[in-house]
Image (cartoon, rainbow, N blue to C red):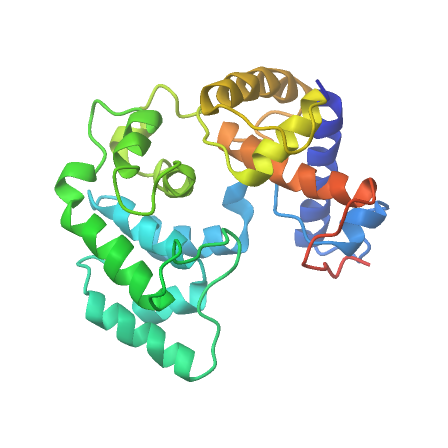
Amino acid sequence: MRANDVARFILAREEVRQLKEAGHVKPWTDDKILQRYRFCNVRREDDIVTRWIAKNWREPNADNPHNWFAMAVARWINWPDTLAAIGYPIPFRPTAVINAMRKRKNAGEKLWTGAYMIGTQGNAKDKILFIVEDVLAPMYQRRAYLKPNEFDTLESFNKRLQECYAMKGGFMGGQIIADIKYTDKHLLAATDWKTWAVSGPGSRRGLNRVIGNDVDAPWREAHWQETMKELWAKVDKLLPKKTLHHMQDLQNCLCEFDKYERVRLGEGTPRSLYPGV
């Protein structure tokens, strides 16, 4: 298991963030791959979009029992300028949200990021209408049932979210949980707050690289989670305290480690360049 390689990557990427935010002159690293290509921060809470969501929606509305739904809206759109145009989405007014998004679209403004590769699940429907009418509106209608409760773990809350349309597989639920678990009083007490994560395509490839499997080898989710816990136990000991907040950060890092290894091994390049030179 390549825990040392993962830890080295995490430390190198975190040093770039620290030097950049401290105002040091670039390059912030001698690593040519980290200089040239964009990689997410090792802690999801340090990413620009997450910081915007936390400051403008999550923290000011921490006592709202349906703040989790605002996080769902935030992650299905995932672009601060669009979220600002919509405004905090509780109560949820689908028509107003659609109109705000169409106004931006008609003005040629960016609507969302491509971070999660969200499509329309094979539907021919307009993407704005699909996300608002087919995904978010039904979720809001079921908010009393779906909201976190005192008996929840992160895993059990995610299982309920997976009952919603387009939430199968749990990946998007994991993104919502990674936000709301910092403020929801029930999820803050969840026994698996630090040790739960759900896989995505990048972290499955990344974990395959770590254990020496073929990069595209399939995973059963339960086996992926067991192996992740083994890696978490090793990597957490190799890093300074609080470098990673929880296993969801490690899941994120494995996506980036997969990107890094792809470049290092000449298998391809990330789509986004980074002004680190």
- 150 vs 10, left or right, is left
Which image quarter holds the N terminus? top right
Q: Nearer the viewer, residue 228 or 244?
A: 228
Q: Position of residue 151 (x, y in %)?
A: 21, 22
Query: How many circles with numbers are drawn on the protein?
Result: 0
**Which quadrant holds residue 222?**
top left
Quarter of the figure with residue 232: top right
Can residue 88 be seen in this snapshot?
Answer: no
Q: Is residue 179 left or right of residue 135?
A: right
Tell me the residue at 20%/38% (across/down).
146
Residue 200 appears at what percent x and percent y? 51, 38
Q: Is residue 118 visible?
A: yes
Which x, y percent locates residue 15?
Answer: 72, 41
From what the image shows, is residue 147 above or below residue 192?
Answer: below
Instruction: Give coordinates of residue 31: x percent, y percent.
Output: 84, 45
Residue at image x 45%, y 54%?
A: 118
Please state which of residues 81 and 218 is positioned toward the viewer in this rendering: 218
